[in-house]
Image (cartoon, rainbow, N blue to C red):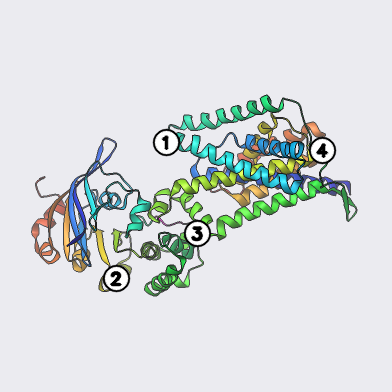
């Protein structure tokens, strides 16, 4: 029974990993660009929730959308302010620009919020549910299912809507998309808005349950890389499966080996997977 | 009257010259063939008109307006569509999605419905496979989709870059029947081809490119009889 509880807990956290990793994979698929500040976007989402709760006593129904919108704004600002110009520059400039941005955002957060760990006060989402003999934390349940639903929604947006189709067209062949009358820079801006917005939501969802500090973005950035590499660069369904899997592995290894081993297990498996399937689970060779 | 007028066009790829001096005109309702061997500059010329590559020198005028160095997404909105070399389909998407993407320049969605019908009627094979991914198509079907996709923007001028390339003769024949039909319906065509016989059989006028320059032009029937054309293809003509 307790094992089942561990599994459910792992999957619920994994769904949130899947949500913020989808954004990273989307931008990669779109413009072959790695955003090293993606974990910091998640961190900013957490602090957006923190600010809303502490200053405005907002509940989850308010602070989650606000975190999303705030990060959409950050994503657009970063795209138009930085990315669009460095895309024309050499590869090294592209890598260093988001790496520098990550440091800037992290230390801005240190400056404003200090390095102390903080937790949100209990929100309207609280308590535990007993389902089929296992106990599930309500905030975790809501966070995990919301994240899974949003990840699936992102996939459906890309595959079933006109805007999604235009976005994927730019991702596959930028010049051909232009021949269709599509403006690539608009689609890329849309991708950055979606990627940052979903990272913001993911951050707000994690913040309900877990304590955090400005340096946590590094952890989530690394997690997102593992998920995206695992699932295959550019694949949202791959990110969903890989996110769930990594949440599960972390939970199981923490349970069987002890909490300090959970990341070791993830990275050991990560390297093993890269060995046999370097393109990731759902990536193209 | 020429709808499209290209004058002394030069395109550079870094230090390399893509085309050096291309001039041509396409009259409304006509079919114009752009001839030349591999590397003569046909693709570069079409890509420059479509706005995919910038012009270093020269002008492109379309219905009296300069469109030189306009971005491709704007050129297609002005009524010029290109079915590019190598098809450049969106392989991860379905035929229907590819056609729908082609209709992006339309002002309203309602305009797309009759265009879908027309394309499916021109190419029944596409109608049968509308939910299939583009990457599952055969070469002939891919060319149909590339042309159908270009038609979805309701162009006034359709540019085709080597539509016969890599296709079986029987399929090429069907394809050219379709082009004749489009021509009969009043569409203006600018057709790049390596195959002189194919292109001149359908064209009103032809231009011959050699190493990035228009070296010869005339009515299609005249060019078809002109031994100089054959010589240019075989590389026998002296460089101009």
The residue that label 4 is drawn on is A121
Q: Nearer the viewer, mark 1 or mark 3?
A: 1
Both marks 1 and 2 on one chain: no
Query: Relative to A109, does residue B234 appear above or below in the rendering?
Result: below
Name the residue rendered at 24%, 48% in the picture.
B39
Mark 3: which secondary structure? loop
Q: Is residue A38 visible?
A: yes
Q: Nearer the viewer, mark 2 or mark 3?
A: 2
Mark 1 near mark 4, Cβ–Cβ under 8 Å?
A: no
Which chain does tag 3 point to? B
Give the residues in magenta: B88-93
Q: Taking A136 as reference, is A250 left or right?
A: left
The residue that label 3 is drawn on is B93
Which chain does tag 4 point to? A
Query: Relative to B225, does residue A245 appear above or below in the rendering?
Result: above
Mark 4: which secondary structure? loop
**Residue A248: quadrant of the picture:** top right
The residue that label 2 is drawn on is B182
Mark 1: which secondary structure? loop
Within 10 Å of the Cα at label 2, are there few (<14), some (14-19), or many (20+) other Cα atoms? some
Q: Nearer the viewer, mark 2 or mark 4?
A: 4
Within 10 Å of the Cα at label 1, are there few (<14), some (14-19), or many (20+) other Cα atoms? few
Earlier in the chain: of badge 2 and badge 3, it is 3
Both marks 1 and 4 on one chain: yes
The residue that label 1 is drawn on is A88
**Residue A118: quadrant of the picture:** top right
- The image position of residue A192, as x and y in percent, is 55, 43
């Amino acid at each position: 029974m307790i094992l089942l509880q561990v599994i459910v807990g792992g999957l619920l956290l994994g769904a949130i990993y899947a949500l913020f990793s989808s954004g990273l994979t989307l931008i990669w698929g779109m413009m072959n660009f790695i955003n090293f500040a993606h974990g910091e976007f998640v961190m900013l989402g957490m602090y957006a929730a923190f600010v809303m709760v502490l200053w405005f006593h907002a509940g989850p129904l308010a602070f989650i959308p606000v975190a999303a919108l705030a990060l959409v704004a950050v994503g657009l600002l970063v795209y138009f302010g930085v990315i669009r110009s460095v895309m024309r520059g050499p590869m090294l400039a592209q890598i260093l620009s988001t790496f520098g941005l990550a440091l800037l955002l992290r230390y801005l957060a240190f400056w404003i919020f200090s390095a102390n760990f903080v937790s949100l006060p209990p929100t309207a989402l609280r308590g535990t549910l007993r389902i089929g003999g296992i106990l599930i934390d309500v905030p975790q349940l809501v966070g995990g299912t919301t994240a899974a639903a949003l990840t699936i929604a992102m996939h459906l947006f890309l595959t079933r809507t006109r805007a999604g189709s235009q976005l994927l067209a730019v991702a596959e062949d930028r010049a051909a998309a232009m021949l269709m009358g599509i403006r690539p820079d608009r689609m890329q801006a849309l991708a950055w808005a979606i990627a940052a917005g979903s990272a913001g939501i993911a951050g707000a969802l994690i913040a309900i349950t877990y304590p955090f500090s400005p340096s946590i973005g590094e952890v989530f950035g690394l997690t997102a890389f593992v998920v995206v590499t695992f699932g295959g660069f550019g694949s949202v369904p791959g990110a969903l499966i890989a996110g769930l899997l990594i949440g599960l592995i972390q939970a199981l290894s923490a349970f069987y080996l002890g909490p300090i081993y959970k990341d070791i297990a993830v990275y050991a498996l990560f390297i093993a997977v890269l060995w046999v399937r370097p393109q990731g689970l759902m990536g193209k060779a | 009257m020429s709808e499209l007028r290209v004058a002394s066009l030069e395109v550079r790829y870094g230090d390399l010259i893509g085309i050096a001096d291309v001039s041509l005109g396409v009259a409304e309702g006509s079919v114009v063939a752009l001839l030349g061997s591999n590397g003569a500059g046909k693709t570069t010329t079409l890509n420059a008109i479509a706005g995919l590559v910038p012009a270093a020198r020269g002008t492109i005028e379309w219905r009296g307006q300069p469109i030189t160095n306009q971005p491709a997404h704007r050129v297609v909105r002005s009524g010029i569509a290109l079915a590019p070399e190598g098809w450049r389909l969106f392989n991860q998407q379905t035929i229907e999605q590819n056609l729908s993407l082609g209709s992006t320049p339309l002002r309203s969605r309602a305009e797309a419905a009759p265009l879908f019908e027309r394309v499916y009627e021109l190419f029944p094979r596409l109608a049968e496979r509308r939910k299939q991914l583009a990457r599952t198509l055969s070469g002939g079907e891919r060319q149909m989709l590339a042309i159908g996709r270009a038609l979805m923007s309701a162009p006034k001028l359709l540019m085709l870059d080597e539509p016969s390339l890599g296709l079986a003769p029987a399929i090429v024949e069907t394809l050219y029947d379709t082009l004749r039909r489009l021509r009969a319906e009043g569409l203006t065509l600018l057709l790049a081809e390596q195959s002189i016989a194919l292109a001149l059989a359908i064209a009103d006028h032809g231009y011959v490119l050699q190493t990035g320059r228009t070296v010869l032009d005339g009515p299609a029937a005249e060019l078809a009889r002109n031994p100089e054309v054959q010589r240019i293809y075989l590389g026998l003509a002296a460089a101009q």
